[in-house]
Amino acid sequence: MATIQDMRLAGDETESGSADSLLLWILVWSELVAFGALLIAFMVMTLRDGEAAALLRSHLHPGLAALNTTLLVVSGWHAALAMRVGDGAVRRPLVLAAVFGLGFMAVKLVEYAIEIRSGIGDAGALAELYFLVTGFHLLHVVFGAAILLLVAWRPSRGNIVVIATLWHAIDLVWLVMFPIVYLT
């Protein structure tokens, strides 16, 4: 049965709600464009310098990246769940989404340490672009996890929708990045 809060959310948006929604989608699309440009640059560089691409890929760990993919998908599921549950049960899925995001961070840092020790820097500019693209994404994950915890501490329906939407954009970027960086 729908609560008054749910009916208000599903009903007519106020002018402020429309503006907030527009700003949210501008932010999401700007993030997708920024990551899209970085990934296109990565693909162009791998095509232009096949030797550096082969060297870079010899240092990458697709198994760890696959584990991170699983962590982000499970995290995204919890973020989506937070939008569906009642106000009394919203904290748990938000915290779990953040915990899985922080798990992604831990695995990525372990992966970076292994790659650096193995000499990934020998791939030159392509290695730098790899760290730029994946590091930029990692910063988004860490920031998003912190916001998930903040919203879990003081949840409001509007903030839950905003962070869950942004979290899904972060997931989407990784789901596109994973095959481009690790599997091609």
Image (spheres, helix red, strand yellow):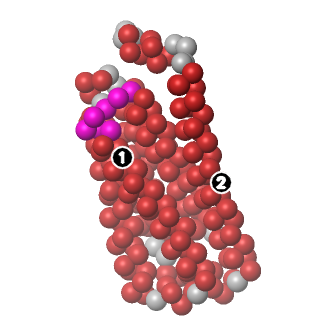
The mark found on residue 147 in the picture is: 1
Q: Is residue 96 magenta?
A: no
Q: Secondary structure at mark 2?
A: helix
Q: Are marks 1 and 2 in contact (CB under 8 Å)?
A: no
Give the left or right position of residue 133, taking residue 66 as reference: right
Residue 26 percent coordinates (x, y): 61, 42
Magenta span: 151-157
Query: Residue 24's spot in the image, x, y percent?
Result: 55, 38
Q: CA distance from mark 1 to mark 2?
A: 22 Å
| Amino acid marked by disc 1 | Ile
Number of numbered tags placed on the structure image: 2
Is residue 152 one of those drawn in magenta? yes
The correct choice, above or below, for 19 with respect to 63 in the image is: above
Q: Amino acid at mark 2?
A: Val
Please name the residue shown 54% across and 90% down the image.
Answer: 122
Q: Residue at image x 57%, y 60%? A: 177
Question: In the picture, residue 117 is in which quadrant?
Answer: bottom left
Q: Which residue is mark 2?
A: 33
- Crowding at mark 1 (Cα within 10 Å: few <14, some 14-19, many 20+): some
Q: Is residue 97 visible?
A: no
Q: In the picture, which quadrant includes the N terminus?
A: top left
Query: How far from the left and from the top, in percent, is residue 166?
Result: 49, 44
What secondary structure is marked by label 1?
helix
Per the rendering, the mark at residue 30 is none
Quarter that holds the C terminus: bottom right
Residue at image position (51%, 87%) is 121
